[in-house]
Amino acid sequence: MSPRELPLLLVRHAEAEEAHVLGDEARALTPEGRALFRQHARKLARLTPLRGILTSPLVRAVQTAELLAEALGLAQVDVHPALLPKKGAARRILKLAHALGPGFALVGHNPSLEKALALALGDDTRAPDKLRKGTAVALRALADDGGYQLEWWAAPGRSLKRYDTQG
């Protein structure tokens, strides 16, 4: 598969602790969240290869990205501040996606990823309204307008949802 044929994945972090003594940034994945996402990551790796993974610096996102990298056989995960759950994150996520091109997974948080997905798809209403923890959404870049087209989405423990990419 050539790099241009690869999708862009938006991935929400897996199930994390409700609280951590060091604050929200330090919240780690729960043992259940880790186990469920590890299994899910193996399924994602069978669906598509990737060239790289960028993640929010928050612990739960980094841990999710590391599990995905392990399943894909990628040696490195890069932390990027555009994926932090702050005001304006959706536009920063899309800007990062355009700069990277296809073949990357961007691991982050809601509501930033949901908003980025809505911006990427424009009027396309086939995407999930809510990204469950651990959900991955595969997007194909549209050459003509800088937007994206939904290919499929998959949530841990759920069946894959494919969409006709011909329109």
Image (cartoon, grey):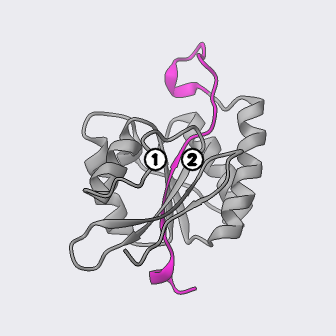
| Secondary structure state at the residue bearing disc 2 | loop
The residue furthest top is 21
Residues rendered magenta in the picture: 1-27
Residue 33: quadrant of the picture: top right
13 inside magenta stretch: yes
Q: Which mark is residue 13?
A: none
Type of amino acid under label 1: Pro
Q: Quadrant of residue 123?
A: bottom left
Q: Quadrant of the N terminus?
A: bottom right
Label disc, if present, on residue 128 of the rendered structure: 1
- Look at the picture and state if 83 lies above or below 126: above
Residue at (49, 70) in percent of width and height: 7
Residue contact between numbered discs 1 and 2, judged by CB atoms under 8 Å: yes
Disc 2 target residue? 135
Q: Position of residue 29 (x, y in %)?
A: 67, 32
* Residue 147 left/right relative to 159: left
Three-letter residue code for mark 2: Thr
Residue 65, percent across and down? 60, 50
Q: Is residue 64 left or right of residue 122?
A: right
Q: Which residue occupies the foreground of this view, 88 or 115?
A: 115
